[in-house]
Image (spheres, rainbow, N blue to C red):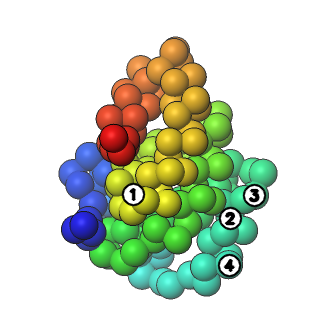
Amino acid sequence: MEMKTSMTSSMVAALPSSMTTVTMSSMSKQAAGTVVQSEAHFLEETMNPGRVRQYLNNSKDYEKAKGMKWLLAMMSKGRDASEFFSDVVKNVVVKGVEVKKMVYMYLVHYADFNASCRELALLSINSFQKDLAASNQLVRAMALRVMSSIRVPE
């Protein structure tokens, strides 16, 4: 099976803008002395796998988002992040759209990576089905996309 090594254009489009581009307005704020918070450090630094797991298993959404950003940064650099699949699948039930979007991007990428990932993805089908009835159209679309990314063995 071929491993996917780069982020798709939809993954890049869904990332917060501070991870993908620097706008002219943020450059002018920097020139004026205002501190601009950037998330580029996720792409530049390495993280201890145990610490990423702590972020993913935290009860606070902003900590989960931090862990997911590290994983998406690893994926964009072509590194294998499939070892975190079980930790990410637990976060399918998160209410926050930002975290849910990153979880679904990860799941689309690794849903068919190997047999154990496929099996864990199948166990979370119930959550995807609930999200198909969500009021947010983005959540519905992501749920449908993940469900269509999972191959069911015959």
- Counting from the top left corner in percent of width and height, residue 14 is at 35, 46
Q: Residue at x 44, y 31 (%)?
A: 143
Element type at mark 2: helix
Amino acid type shown at disc 3: Asn
- Counting from the top left corner in percent of width and height, residue 148 is at 32, 35
* Label 2 to label 4: alpha-carbon separation: 9 Å
* Label 1 to label 4: alpha-carbon separation: 20 Å
Q: Does label 1 or label 4 sit earlier along the sequence? A: 4
For disc 2, the marked residue is 55
For disc 4, the marked residue is 50
Amino acid type shown at disc 4: Gly
Screen quadrant of the N terminus: bottom left
User: Contact, CB < 8 Å: mark 2 with mark 4?
Assistant: no
User: Contact, CB < 8 Å: mark 3 with mark 2?
Assistant: yes
* Label 3 to label 2: alpha-carbon separation: 5 Å
Foreground label between 1 and 4 = 1
Foreground label between 2 and 4 = 4
Residue 113 quadrant: bottom left
